Image (cartoon, rainbow, N blue to C red):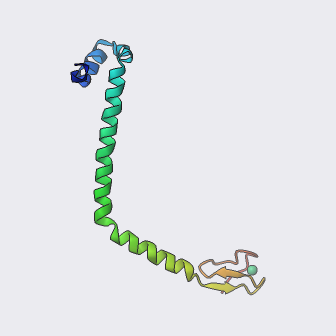
Amino acid sequence: MIGDIDWEAFAAHLRAEGEEHILEQYPEYAEYLKRKNTEERKVERRLDAKDNASSDPAPLRERIVEKVIERQVIVMRCAYCKALTPVDLRECQFCGGPLS
Ligand SMILES: [Zn+2]
């Protein structure tokens, strides 16, 4: 069975012999690499999922707080052009006038 070939060892052997190009003649090797990559990615995703499960509640709360603050942005009326500018800016975003 071709599926039983230890491609890792086979590739290492060819690499040592400088015959790596021979691997291109084996579509099974490409299949093997694809399968290997897919499996590694699956493992990574599982690790990600674990991280999210343990640390999700806090970021979620932070996101909600952020949104609330966003909606309550305090604005000041510029003394020069009368436009509304968020108070956390030091200068009017329209005319550049200083905000007291
Ligand atoms: Zn202004």
Residue drawn at 26 percent across, 21 percent down: 12
Which quadrant of the figure contains the C terminus?
A: bottom right
Q: Position of residue 98 (x, y in %)?
A: 70, 81
Q: Quadrant of residue 49?
A: bottom left
Q: Where is residue 34 in the image (x, y as percent from the top left)?
A: 36, 32
- Position above or below: 1 against 56: above
* Front position in the image: 99 or 26: 26
Please state the quadrant of the image where ligand 1 appears: bottom right
Q: Residue furthest right?
A: 81
Which quadrant of the figure contains the N terminus?
A: top left
Q: In which quarter of the image is residue 72?
A: bottom right
Residue drawn at 25 percent across, 19 percent down: 2
- In the visual, does 75 lie left or right of 69? right
Q: Where is residue 19 in the image (x, y as percent from the top left)?
A: 33, 12
Q: Quadrant of residue 26?
A: top left
* Front position in the image: 80 or 41: 41
Q: How many marks?
A: 0
- Position above or below: 91 against 7: below
Residue drawn at 28 percent across, 52 percent down: 47
Residue drawn at 44 percent across, 72 percent down: 63
- In the visual, does 47 lie left or right of 96? left
- Position above or below: 78 against 14: below
- Position above or below: 1 against 72: above
